[in-house]
Image (cartoon, rainbow, N blue to C red):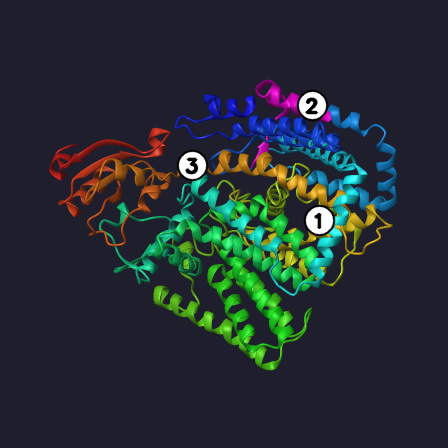
Amino acid sequence: MGSLVFAFLSPQYRDGEGFFRGNVCFPIALAIALFLVGYGSSKSWKETAFWLALILVGQAAAVQLIDAGQVIRYPHYRPFMTLISASPWFVSVIALQAIFVLIGLRGRFNKIKSWVSGNFNSWQFAGLVFCFFVTSATVSRDTGLYIQEIPLAGFIQFINLINIVIAVWAIPEPVVLLWRTRMERLSRSASRGKWKFDPVAIAAAIFAAILAGVLSFFVYERHPHLGDEVAYLYQARYLASGMLSMPVPVPLEAFNLDLFDFDTQRWYATPPVGWPLVLSFGVILNADWVVNPVLSGMCVLLTFLLVHELYDRQTARLTVSLLALSPWHAFVGMSYMTHMSALAFALLAAVAVVWSGKNRSTFLALVGGMATGMVGMIRPLEGAIMGFLLGLWVIGIGRKRLKLTGILAWILGISFIAVAIFYYNHLLTGDPTKFPIMVWADKYMGVNSNAFGFGPERGSGWPIDPYPGHSPLDAIINSNLNITAINAELFGWSTGSLILILLFCFWLKFRGADWQMAIMLAAVYITHFFYWFSGGPDFAARYWFLMVVPCVVLSVRGVQELSARLDRNQRTAGILNLRALAAAIFLSLISIIGFTAWRSIDKYHHYLKMRPDVRHLASEYRFGKSLILIRGEQFPDFASAAIYNPIDLQAEVPIYAWDENPNLRLRILQAFRDRPVWIVNGPSLTNGGFQVVEGPLSVDVVLQRK
């Protein structure tokens, strides 16, 4: 209790504005660990409680050694000697964890060695160890630092892997038997059920939506943090007003934003229109920040339906339980990014196609086609992937073939959305085949800079782009960036999130639906291999987000195969070995504090200095019908304020304009002479929040200044 009170009251765990820092997660984890040990001390599972507490504290200490923060960079452990001098306390905690684990390994080592030798041949074990270590650290430009980081990151993962093995090994046999009996009863009840949705699926969906919503409200502050998100939300706002574009603002330079284009009469956002169209419904309800959290809950329900059809209820339940606890899923769900909506429509399309084949329903085939088309309207590349893979199911490859009217209905559904996409392109670019985003990229980044495939002209020159252009070497580096991100954020496990997938893959126990999951992973990977950008360090491997469900499913299959190998004499078919199941659930629950809470606070609160301060300043200072000159950079300073501009710049509400230089300021003042003027410094100038410098001033007073 004292540790918890200290965490909430001590100023060292808060920033200058009173919000928590990422380091607050350690004392909170310590408090929970002490409670767990104390509460479990009188229970039969007290030894398990100790080992779980050790994992929690160890992970909470390990993440404090990572350089991430609120800037665009991939997370890396600091160099070891730097850690020794700068973070000796956290290094000591990890060292202490390692000592306890080595002590706990005594008496168990020979049994573990025997089990490993009985379940892996030499190539399987060597491959597993190699993949386990190489995915533990993200590649660096400095090869020397990367070579130093791999042993440290791999060691931390390995210690936690042995730790969780000891923890579940220590579960008393009576507890195992008790919970196995309950699971058998639950399994029998589920097998008799006719209802598609069961309590586990509903609870998981509600939890996922609430988790994403809480993060969106408190951490993301209901405010876009990336330039992409600003464009999406702005586009959603004018779509909600019934407009496909806006009049060109005067002066344009004072209001223009990244990913926006213009001609003589129109000004518009260039990203694909699908996600802004979905987001516009939230804008209409004045709840745009709720859309992705709701979609995250829907994705959990749709995942249950799909996995239940492809596998069974037990697999579906465990899949949605782990998906709901996934940090990757939660962080995308809290954002304003496109990926959750693309996943939702992809899952809807898959479920509709499966049900259409099962029920011979033409209507469901039409729904599946339209949902597939919507994936393309949101993210064209992902739409192509889903169209190809679901097309195989539609014609009977991998699933029962749809009847002829169903096939035609599926094609019609896709065609209907495709026509809408082409018509939208025609209205904005004059060419149905030219997407506005591609025209924008050619215009501002260079011809073919955003094109698919390899070539020296590909790319934007961003620091996080490995090399100029795009080549197979770039693609391999991008692969490392995304695979290691998934290893960290799929589940947030201190053992690495890919461990169960690796086990399952090296055991080569694939069956029908497993191959379909693997094909989905391969399709997403191969397609993006030929695209120049990895997606960056925001929201893990966000360009690969369609992988999240197959990754979770194959992890569950890893649990099932591990269960079978741990209990060869299992009496009841289909009942998981409790220890294997407990390991996955324990690690996911621990990661809520050990990883998800830390990552959300450390990285995403005021990420890239994007802040909603002007929303509060407008109320505090009663800006009203005023002109607010925003000083600083276009991003993040003006971009943070611009999203609060009205669609109609003549509306009697605050107008935010970028005060880039004196010449532009003069043009702004001439365009808005009837408004009082406020001058506000942005975060890049204050190194904090937005600050009102002066106001209200008359336009004439400001004009008289040099």
Residue 221 position, x and y percent, is 41, 41
* Residue 399 visible to the viewer: yes
Q: Position of residue 356 (x, y in %)?
A: 60, 73
Residue at image point 49% right, 52% down: 457
Seen in the picture, residue 618 relative to 250 is either above or below; the reply is above
Q: Which secondary structure class fits the magenta region best?
A: helix
- Contact flag, marks 2 and 3 (Cβ < 8 Å): no
Instruction: Name which quarter of the figure residue 99 lies in.
Output: top right
Q: Amino acid at mark 1?
A: Ile
Pointer 3 residue: 606
Q: Is residue 180 magenta?
A: no
Q: Which residue is mark 2?
A: 95
Vertical relation: 350 (above or below) 703: below
**Residue kind at label 2, given as amino acid type:** Ala
**Which numbered circle lies on residue 501?**
1
Magenta stretch? 75-98
Badge 3 element: loop
Which one is earlier in the sequence, the residue at label 2 or at label 3?
2
Q: In the visual, does 546 lie left or right of 693?
A: right
Please state the horizontal and vertical placement of residue 49, each as a whole percent of the image: 70, 31
Which is more N-terminal, label 2 or label 1? 2
Q: Secondary structure at mark 2?
A: helix
